[in-house]
Amino acid sequence: MKNLDMSLYLVTDSTYHTEESLLRTVEAACEGGVTLVQLREKHAGGREYLEKARKVREITDRFGIPLIIDDRVDVAMACGAAGVHVGSSDLPVSEVRRILGPDRIVGATAKTVEAARKAYEDGADYLGVGAIYPTTTKVVTIRTEVSTLDAICRAVPIPAVAIGGLNLENMGILDGTPIAGIAVVSAIMKAEDPKKAASDLLGKVRQMRH
């Protein structure tokens, strides 16, 4: 199992950013302590996605933070990213693992214990579980109960992060669950001070896990 620090996982959202402000926000978040970054570009063509991925990777590499590409295995391979995250309607985990080989990171979304076990058996390194709260992103989400999150964490030996509308004020709902960390979008991407937002979130996650 790969040694991943999943404490604070930033998932990007370009819908309210120029490319310049997106890169600035990612850099500030890295300064603030995010431990993993996923570039998520739901509406970008392959060339645009790749160009942006290379720019983001320059930033994450400086901070020694793994870059995960959402959905696009080809973009991940072309830019030399650390891995890929796939959702339930993307390529199957087993196929992504076959293409990427054993050394890169493969993450999967899981909303049920059955899906979590299948993802683990097919080669996933970690799970994203949610949405814990309704989100403001353009991604269609279905709520996941904290009890389900807890059951998923206990059902598989790979780390699981909670995702979906989480912020500094509402993440207390996760207290007591054996999560590896939280994944956030708006709490950092929409923050006036992304560096401080990341730092505060990381502190709260570490306090909660102890």
Image (spheres, rainbow, N blue to C red):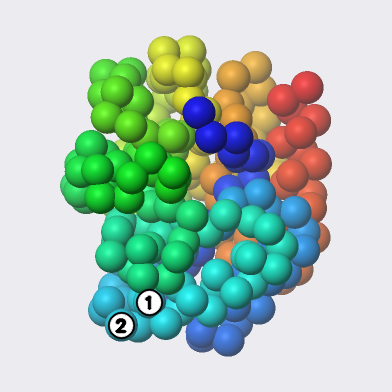
Q: What residue lies at 66% left-to-right and 78% top-to-bottom?
A: 24
Position of 11 compared to 168: left or right?
left
Q: What residue lies at 45% left-to-right and 34% top-to-bottom?
A: 126
Position of 48 compared to 60: left or right?
left
Q: Residues within 10 Å of mark 2 (few under 14, many from 20)?
A: few
Viewer can see residue 153: yes
Q: What residue lies at 33% left-to-right and 32% top-to-bottom?
A: 123
Q: Which residue is at the front of the view, 151 or 133?
A: 151
Identity, as a three-letter code, of the amino acid under mark 1: Leu
Quadrant assignment for the C terminus: top right
Q: Looking at the image, how many numbered discs can be counted on the residues?
A: 2
Q: Position of residue 131 (x, y in %)?
A: 42, 39
Above-or-below relation of 146 to 181: above
Q: Position of residue 49 (x, y in %)?
A: 36, 76
Q: Circles 2 and 1: CB distance less than 8 Å?
A: yes
Q: What residue lies at 35% left-to-right and 26% top-to-bottom?
A: 120
The residue beneath circle 2 is 47
Q: Residues within 10 Å of mark 1 (few under 14, many from 20)?
A: many
The residue beneath circle 1 is 50
Q: Secondary structure at mark 2?
A: helix
Q: Secondary structure at mark 1?
A: helix
Q: Quadrant of residue 73?
A: bottom left
Which label was assigned to residue 189? Answer: none
Q: Quadrant of residue 202?
A: top right
Identity, as a three-letter code, of the amino acid under mark 2: Arg
Q: Position of residue 208 (x, y in %)?
A: 74, 27
Q: Position of residue 121 (x, y in %)?
A: 29, 23
Position of 193 compared to 164: left or right?
right
Disc 2 to disc 1, how far (Cα)? 5 Å
Position of 25 compared to 124: left or right?
right
Viewer can see residue 190: no
